[in-house]
Image (cartoon, rainbow, N blue to C red):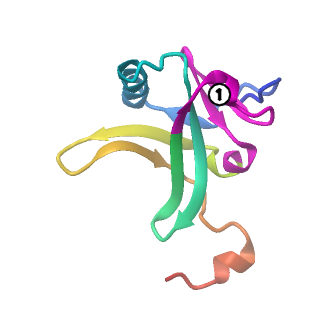
Amino acid sequence: MRRATAGASQDLITVTPQALGRIRATLREAGREGYWLRVELVGRGEAGFLYRLTFIPSELHEPEDILQPLDRLRLVIDPLSARYLTGATLRYLESAKESGFKIDNPNPLWRDPLAAASPRR
């Protein structure tokens, strides 16, 4: 992972070749080559974390964002989301049942003991 100014060299999120290909194709089709992909955790639901994926111009990232190189692109991850995305995999699925990006995340939904003990509905 990399902060906007410096950092370590380990990736937070693994991106499959299919997902990378779809990201490139989407940017090309939209005429937005040179944009970066922002990955944000926006909440938790019964089935898992909720995410928002957004293409942004490179100059719109925040100084505290983590920048992960991705071929000629970059993933932009805010520090709060990064806590819950370490080890996640971004995939692109295309089948009769489903189509789109999917994030497989090995991190627990509820880390703190009080929230983990609460019943879910």
Q: Is residue 29 left or right of residue 90?
A: left
Look at 42% across and 46% down and name the residue there: 102
Identify the residue position indicated by label 1 in the image: 68
From the top left corner, tell me how far across and down residue 51 is, in percent: 53, 51
Residue 60 counted in the magenta span: yes
Q: Residue at x 42, y 18 (%)?
A: 31
Q: Residue 110: image x %, image y %?
A: 64, 68
Indicate left or right for 27 with 81 as reference: left
Tag 1 secondary structure: strand
Residue at 73 percent across and 50 percent down: it is 80
Quadrant of the rendered image containing residue 66: top right
Q: 39 above or below 68?
A: below
Q: Which amino acid lies under the numbered mark 1 shown in the image of this protein?
A: Gln
Give whichever of 19, 56 is nearer the camera.
56
Q: Position of residue 50 (x, y in %)?
A: 52, 57
State the residue in front, 58 or 50.
Answer: 58
Q: Considering only vertical position in the picture, is 57 above or below 49?
A: above
**Magenta stretch in the rendered image:** 54-82
Give the quarter of the image for residue 77: top right
